[in-house]
Amino acid sequence: MGNSTKQEKANILFLMSDQQRPDSLGCYGDSIAETPNLDSLAVQGVVFDNCYVQNPLCCPSRYSILTGRYPHCHGVRANWYKRRPGETSFAHRLGRSGYGTAAIGKMHFTPWHDNFGFDGRIIAESKFHIHCPDDYERYLNKHNMSRMDLYDMASRHYRDNCSAVKSKVSPDLHIDSFVGLSICEYLKNVSEPFCLFASFLSPHNPYDPPEPYDRLFEGVEFPPRNMTEGEVRRKPKEAYNYINKRLSTDKVNESWSTTTDRISDAQVNKMKAHYYATNTLIDDWVGRTIEVLKEQGLYDNTIIVYCSDHGDLLGDHGLVFKQCFYEQSVRVPLIVHAPGIYGPRRVESPVESIDLFSTFCDFAGIPPGEGVQGRSLTPLLRGDADYRHREAVFSENYFGRMVRCGDYKMVYYPGKPYGEIYNLAEDPNEQENLWDALDGSSVKADLKDRLLEWSFSSEDVLPLPVRPGHQDHSPRRYRLEGGDTLECERQPWYLPGLDGLYEGWDFTESGILR
């Protein structure tokens, strides 16, 4: 039901990857990556070189993007926390202005099948949370498989390869292919104007490319990790201790048998090879998505935005995954493709991921509404020479706060006599901690003042609601009522709003995978 007639409002296609660092893409300078479709979007679009997320962890970051608000305001400060009552998403705002809205793939909501303002969802909520009876599980069931078949986390092979394992399913059954198929089917059936938020689940661990993607980077020697002798001993231990404690106690990662700084170069190389391979799988689906947009006559009137929720350390600084403020964890790719509106350019100015909310509202020609803390990126997209977007950008997690201003980044640990300061211009690898060396300096005082001002000026006074037992991943039963979720007796497979649409899709894409 594609519509080739141009609409007054531009369509918005928001594509997100999970745990993707910018320097794993060709358009951000990586010579090994095979991401031609994203690179093409970047050549024709606007590339932001310094986009920072507001919390380098899935749930808090995603809720910040959706609400345009900092984590200490929307209330989601860690995974599986519940948002504060009354929070609204960009889907609420766009839906009220005439857009059809949908969400496909991983949202990481609490509860996991909430719709948070979207007209409907196709849910593929996690690679390894087998207790989510979502649409991807149903898709596997139709092919006589289940998530329980996908990983053997207790095996030595899984442990020795740091969760870098070949997928047990064919390319068309991989969870990222399910998301890609759903995107294409949605675009074949959509009415304009639309806002589609589609989130792939890679390159998040387990690093699990299907065949033949698993062989794309076989034998490739990646540049050595960013880690120096004795670095872990010299640096504050907050992130290091947290990540290693989690890996030693979390059942999802119970196969890890060593601390992250002791992972071998061979293990890091294996992780990177599989990480890059899943990036290429996503890139192929981006390419097919663009083809479908063109086939349906939607391409010229659709703004494509590509981003991620946080990065991945991949062994850098003796760490894996995310949850800290090193560049590989807190900075993400951001590409905006609308060549008919915005000319191609690169933007050096630091921006925050919460800025996407106001930007989407600008695309739709509506105000963002009260309480939104993000700022529209449209002046930067236009290349306004005299416009200054932000003097500083901020991020937070539950044990620290980060500010970047100019060349300097500070990580502040409340109540602790130590912290971190890096000059990113002179020390882009963040090896020389200047915290003590800058004692008494105007640089350190200014960074502290900015953090203090931000902490107070951005604070909400509402209490923080936390779901009891928020680490509990067991099945729960909910129903939607009045835009909120209430527990009920029957666990739905998917939201009723997409019953007819989903059941009518045959997923007949062919000839697009390697």
Image (cartoon, rainbow, N blue to C red):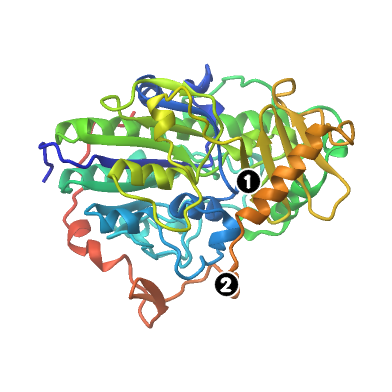
Q: Is residue 328 left or right of residue 137?
A: right
Q: Disc 1 marks which amino acid?
A: Ser
Q: Position of residue 477 (x, y in %)?
A: 41, 76
Q: Is residue 351 above or below residue 222?
A: below
Pick the residue in front: 424 or 239: 424
The residue at the point 56 percent across, 36 percent down is: 390
**Which residue is labeled 2 in the image?**
465
Q: Position of residue 25 (x, y in %)?
A: 49, 26
Q: Is residue 352 left or right of residue 337?
A: right
Can residue 79 be spotted in the picture? no
**Which residue is labeled 1 in the image?**
395
Q: Disc 2 marks which amino acid?
A: Pro
Q: Position of residue 45 (x, y in %)?
A: 37, 25
Q: Is disc 1 surrounded by few (<14), some (14 to 19) or many (20+) residues within 10 Å?
A: many
Q: Is residue 391 above or below residue 157?
A: above
Pick the residue in front: 386 or 127: 386
The residue at the point 24 percent across, 39 percent down is: 10
Q: Position of residue 80 (x, y in %)?
A: 55, 63
